[in-house]
Amino acid sequence: MTEFIQHLINGLSVGSMYALIAIGYTLVFGVLQLINFAHGEIFMLGAFVGMYSALFFGFGQTSSLLGLFLVLTLSMLVCAGVGYVIERFAYRPLRKAPRINVLITAVGVSMFLQFTGQLFFGSDPKFFPQIYSPAGYWSVGSVQLNPLQFFVLGISLCLMMALHRLVFHTRMGRAMRAVSFNHDLASLMGIPTNRVISYTFMVGSALAGAAGVLVGLTYPKIEPLMGVMPGLKAFVAVVLGGVGSILGAVVGSLILGLAEEFVVGYWAPTYRDALSFGILILILLIKPRGLFGKIQIEKV
């Protein structure tokens, strides 16, 4: 039972970090019907911005909760800015182009960021400073729990609740939902669609940047290609939960995180990455719309 609880906490912690990346995928798909394959590299950039800002301010010397929030904020702001630049100069000129053109561009932007990261940061792994590292463990009976995992899970949940508030209880959120429903109709109603789309990219990129910092805290080794596999797994989580559904992205990510952790704990660690793509194949065969996906009628 002790081992099961430990794997459960680990799975929820990993799943919450996947969720921050997956939400960015589903937000962008909602307003543009586009899977932004460069999103995993934004996650990588967030980790490196967090590392260098922590070193610049000297937060790696001692554990500092204030330092963590400052580094987290800086990473989110920088990643939001990069998300705006990507949307403005890579995707907006192709707004009326065929879907395949935009898809190829997304892959190209992803590769550009990967190799640019290797050029500027170096290809060797870097150690992420332990900005905040709670001392000791929490004991619940015979279970030893790492407080850092609960802290990461708590930050992730707070960011998700803030996003829910933004999307469903603000004027910009209503505009985002209107553009998601019908881009052309929203434009005719006076909604500045270009501004809304840019804002959506910035919000999704900021969440990915936060995920990069949280992953750096939990798994201190970071490198320029670290966004490839988490990005693919977050995409699997989006498909599992239902493309375009924020709730589906969160639930799919938590399911994926738990499944990976239990495979590692009770079966074989070597099947951890293969599990994600096995789930992708199964969901496409059994329920292509995902758990919370909606059936849409398209006129041809």
Image (tube, rainbow, N blue to C red):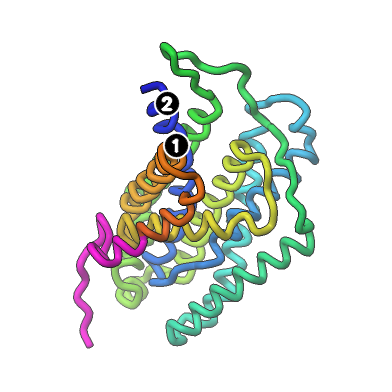
State whether the magenta stretch is mostly helix, strand or loop: loop
Q: Position of residue 252 (x, y in %)?
A: 35, 50
Q: Residue at x 45, y 68 (%)?
A: 35
Q: Residue at x 20, y 67 (%)?
A: 295
Q: Residue at x 57, y 60 (%)?
A: 228
Q: Residue type at mark 2: give it.
A: Glu
Residue 82 belongs to the span the image colors magenta: no
**Do the residues under discs 2 and 1 have CB atoms within 8 angstroms?**
yes
Image quadrant holding the N terminus, namely top left
Q: Position of residue 20 (x, y in %)?
A: 47, 48
Nearest to N terminus: mark 2 or mark 1: 2
Q: Residue type at mark 1: give it.
A: Gly
Where residue 287 sits, quadrant-wise, is: bottom left
Gap between marks 2 and 1 measured at Cα: 8 Å
Answer left or right for 284 relative to 222.
left
Number of numbered discs: 2
Image quadrant holding the C terminus, namely bottom left
Q: Residue furthest top?
A: 141
- Does residue 232 lie above or below 270 as drawn? below
Residue 265, numbered circle? 1
- Would you name the residue on which mark 2 appears? 3
Please name whichever residue, 213 or 281, is drawn nearer the observer in this view of the structure.
281
- Does residue 74 lie above or below 97 as drawn? above
Look at the image and give the residue range highlighted in magenta.
280-300
Label 1: which secondary element: helix
Q: Residues within 10 Å of mark 2 (few under 14, many from 20)?
A: few
Label 2: which secondary element: helix
Please name whichever residue, 248 or 221, is drawn nearer the observer in this view of the structure.
221
Q: Position of residue 155 (x, y in %)?
A: 50, 35
